Image: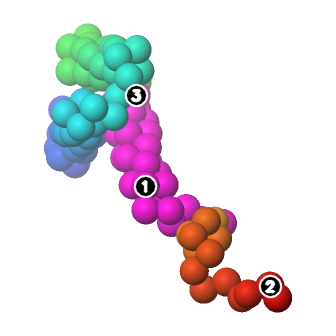
């Protein structure tokens, strides 16, 4: 089989593993949430690399890619929330800085 983008097979796996390890090390994952995500990672990896059919391998790749996207978005949203910079939210409202005085 000719692989057009061989990095595509490993990109989602490496991204998922890296973000999972980072979230686990920082203590931002509850044990129940971590077990679900780890199970998802293992099932997707097994399907992707050890499947005997191309269809199951494709399902594994899609699952792994969706997991990587979910983890990256979750990390980015937590970072935005930590600095108070979520879209649609004015970070100055909670501090009162820069708001006109109401006399």
Residue 53 picture quarter = top left
Q: Is residue 31 something that shows in the picture?
A: yes
Magenta range is: 60-88
Q: Which residue is mark 2?
A: 102
Q: Main secondary structure of the magenta part?
A: helix
Q: Earlier in the sequence, mark 1 or mark 2?
A: 1
Give coordinates of residue 98: x percent, y percent. Answer: 60, 86
Work out how far the residue at label 1 is from the one at label 3, CA to CA, in angstroms.
Answer: 28 Å
Tell me the quadrant of the picture where the C terminus can be found. bottom right
Is residue 16 rendered to the left or right of residue 76?
left
**Residue most extreme to the front:** 103
Q: Which residue is mark 3?
A: 63
Is residue 14 rendered to the left or right of residue 72?
left
Q: Earlier in the sequence, mark 1 or mark 3?
A: 3
**For the point 17% across and 44% down, which residue is it?**
6
Is residue 71 rendered to the left or right of residue 45?
right
**For the point 66% across and 66% down, which residue is it?**
88
Q: Which residue is mark 1?
A: 82
**For the point 24% across and 37% down, which residue is it?**
26
Q: Earlier in the sequence, mark 2 or mark 3?
A: 3
Residue 20 picture quarter = top left
Give coordinates of residue 59: x percent, y percent. Answer: 40, 24
Work out how far the residue at label 1 is from the one at label 2, CA to CA, in angstroms.
Answer: 29 Å
Residue 14 picture quarter = top left
Work out how far the residue at label 2 is from the one at label 3, CA to CA, in angstroms.
Answer: 53 Å
User: For the residue labelled by badge 1, is the local secondary structure a helix, a strand or a loop?
Assistant: helix
Judged by depth in the image, the label closer to the viewer, 1 or 2, is 2
- Whether the magenta-drawn stretch holds residue 79 is answered as yes
Q: Nearer the viewer, residue 32 or 42?
A: 32
Give coordinates of residue 70: x percent, y percent. Answer: 44, 39
Q: Nearer the viewer, residue 45 or 32?
A: 32
Q: Nearer the viewer, residue 17 or 27?
A: 27
């Amino acid at each position: 089989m000719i692989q057009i983008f061989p990095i595509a097979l490993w990109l989602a796996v490496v991204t998922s593993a890296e973000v999972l390890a980072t979230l686990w090390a920082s203590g931002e994952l509850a044990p129940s949430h971590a077990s679900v995500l780890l199970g998802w990672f293992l099932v997707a990896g097994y399907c992707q690399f050890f499947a005997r059919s191309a269809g199951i391998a494709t399902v594994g790749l899609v699952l792994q890619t969706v997991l990587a996207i979910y983890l990256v978005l979750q990390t980015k949203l937590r970072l935005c929330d930590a600095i108070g910079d979520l879209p649609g939210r004015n970070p100055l409202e909670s501090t009162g800085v820069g708001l006109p005085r109401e006399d």
